[in-house]
Amino acid sequence: QVQLVESGGGLVQAGDSLRLSCAASGRTVSWYGMGWFRQVPGKEREFVAALTWSGGTIYYEDSVKGRFTISRDIAKNTVYLQMNSLKPEDTAVYYCAARVGAVRTTAQEYHYWGQGTQVTVSS
């Protein structure tokens, strides 16, 4: 089964950029849906972006359109989230997730999760 490890988080100022990486162990197959979610204490886990391994970008949450870009490197079994023009409200733990089949925008429909990486954006 696939294992996911996120990296690339950190503490930045508003307007800065970060690139998150999600490394998938073992063999990553084309029929997996891959997503990025984020969560703050006391809140539900929120959809950010998702793609199919073979089909590229599928969905973005409206608040990140034009600022965030999801992509993947098939050879490296890695999914990326490029985060530009960061805002304090982007502060959260960011999680990479995978599911068997088509992409979805709700966390409970994903089968595999990484441990998360903290992104903190100061004013």
Image (spheres, rainbow, N blue to C red):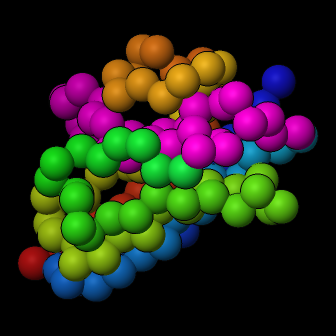
**Residue situated in front as seen by the camera: 8 or 41:** 8
**Residue situated in front as seen by the camera: 119 or 103:** 103
Asked where in the image residue 55 lies, by quadrant, the reply is top right
Q: Residue furthest front?
A: 55
Residue 89 in view, yes or no? yes
In the image, the segment drawn in magenta is: 27-55
State the residue at coordinates (35%, 80%).
17
State the residue at coordinates (49%, 29%).
103
Q: Residue furthest right?
A: 26
**In the image, is residue 83 above or below residue 36?**
below
**Magenta stretch containing residue 31, yes or no?**
yes
**Residue situated in front as seen by the camera: 117 or 1:** 1
- Residue 116 on image: x %, y %: 51, 46
State the residue at coordinates (75%, 46%).
24
- Residue 21 on image: x %, y %: 59, 61
Q: Is residue 71 found left or right of 119 in the rendered image?
A: right
